[in-house]
Amino acid sequence: MRVDVRRQLESDSRGYIRVHEYYQICEQNNFHKREDQLQLSSYLHFQDDPVLKHIVILNPTWGTDAVYKVLDNS
């Protein structure tokens, strides 16, 4: 189950997805328990951040580049 979720996330070419899309991917791959879904996404998803909790970062480079763009513009 987790392996299937991981494969699907790794094959996605986007830099991030919305958290509801992540939950759908988990459900489609028979990974149903929300606490397990949150545990799996803890490395990609800033669950406690009020702004970032709505996205799951798929590409760490995308996340880093986004932060640098914000810093460069301040």
Image: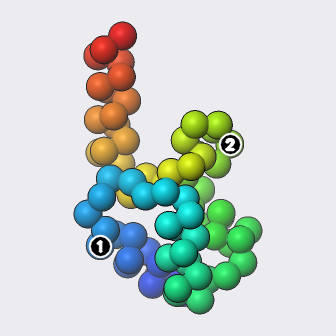
Instruction: Indicate the position of residue 70 as horizontal and vertical percent values.
Output: 36, 22
Q: Residue at x 30, y 58 (%)?
A: 14
Camera sees residue 52: yes
Q: In the rendered view of the protein, which quadrant contains the C terminus?
A: top left
Locate residue 66 relative to residue 54 in the image: left or right.
Answer: left
- Above or below 34: residue 59: above
Q: Residues within 10 Å of mark 2 (few under 14, many from 20)?
A: few
Locate residue 29 relative to residue 9 in the image: left or right.
Answer: right
Amino acid tagged 1: Ser
Q: Residue at x 63, y 70 (%)?
A: 37
- Above or below 72: residue 37: below
Image quadrant of residue 50? top right
CA–CA distance in space, label 1 to label 2? 26 Å
Amino acid tagged 2: Asp
Residue 48's tag is: 2
Q: Residue at x 50, y 51 (%)?
A: 55
Instruction: Indicate the position of residue 23 as horizontal and vertical percent values.
Output: 58, 70
Of mark 1 and mark 2, the one earlier in the sequence is: 1
Locate residue 4 relative to residue 23 in the image: left or right.
Answer: left
Q: Where does label 1 land, which residue?
A: 11
